[in-house]
Amino acid sequence: MAGHSQFKNIMHRKGRQDAAKSKMFSKLAREITVAAKEGLPDPAMNPRLRLAVQNAKAQSMPKDNIERAIKKASGGDGESYETVRYEGYGPGGVAIIVEGLTDNRNRTASNVRAAFTKAGGSMGETGSVAFMFDRVGEIVYPAGAGDAERVMEAAIEAGAEDVQSDENGHVITCAFEDIGDVTGALEAALGEAESVRPVWRPQTGTPVDEERAQSILKLIATLEDDDDVQNVYANFEVDDETMARLSAA
């Protein structure tokens, strides 16, 4: 029975992983379609589409799915998505920014507000927490791109603002308006990045204990599970030991 139970647990985990991958591909496809609709359907001539395709490839999204998402932009299927952003406070006064793409603003706003309320937080007006974050470009390279010194030199030459390197890879940040130029210069020096995207980087962190951290992570998971939500950013801080325990739970 123990072996059978273990097999069922493995299959359950695989089912959750497959569902998560399917949801991720759906969100990536939506971003590709919106980017292609807003500009030319050619990644070489459309910076936003190029980034969307690059990030989809980094997540191992099949080529057919990417091409289908681009074609959908000119298919006249009636779907029209708009970019939305919601801001608010989670447990412990943690500032949270939620970005989404939606074809029904009322539905998305209602779902996001419900998630905040259920977690004991509150959704605020646009701009209520954004001032606590900086809008920057984030460019990620795998560890195989080179050692920390080589990547640092390439980043400085490219005009980046910061580099964080560890055994998992390199995270390079730059001014939001420079993301295209910096990415191009880095590609010439290091090759194609693993991912390139604009992000909201907290200016300072809000320390929280394990209980609050658990509540915040649950809220973020709930938000990310919403089909209309593309990205969630929060400014909470928790020590590595606590995060390791929460990740293992």
Image (spheres, grey):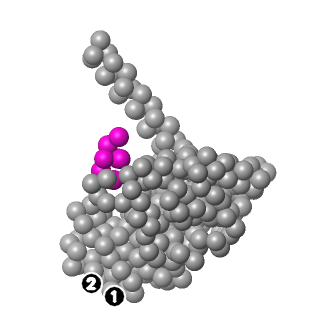
Q: Give the left or right position of residue 109, taking residue 147 as reference.
A: right
Count the labels in the image: 2
Q: Is residue 225 above or below residue 32?
A: above
Mark 2: few, some, or many residues within 10 Å (few <14, many ≥20)? few
Q: Is residue 217 visible?
A: no
Mark 2 residue type:
Glu
Q: What residue lies at 40% left-to-right and 32% top-to-bottom? A: 14
* Neighbour tally class for label 1: few under 14, some 14-19, many 20 plus, Cα within 10 Å: few
Q: Report the residue marked by disc 2.
A: 153
Q: Which residues are magenta?
A: 243-249
The residues tagged by marks 1 and 2 sit, at their Cα atoms, a distance apart of 6 Å
* Residue type (three-letter) at the residue carrying disc 1: Glu
**Helix, strand or loop under label 1:** helix
Residue 122 appearing in the image = yes
Q: Could you say whether the residue bearing mark 2 is in a helix, strand or loop?
A: helix
Image vertical order of residue 175 relative to residue 231, above or below = below
The residue to which callout 1 is attached is 157
> Do the CB atoms of the residues marked 1 and 2 lie less than 8 Å apart?
yes
Q: Mark on residue 73?
A: none
Q: Residue at x 24, y 66 (%)?
A: 166
Q: Residue at x 50, y 69 (%)?
A: 199
Question: Where in the figure is residue 40, as x and y percent of width and height?
Answer: 65, 68
From the image, which quarter does the N terminus lie in? top left
| Rendered residue at 31%/69% (across/down) | 170
Q: Quadrant of residue 229?
A: bottom right
x, y percent for residue 78: 79, 51
Task: Name the foreground residue: 184 vs 231.
Answer: 231
Q: Is residue 154 magenta?
A: no
Quadrant the C terminus occupies: top left
| Residue 15 x, y percent position in the rendering | 45, 31
Residue 34 position in % (x across, y down): 66, 60
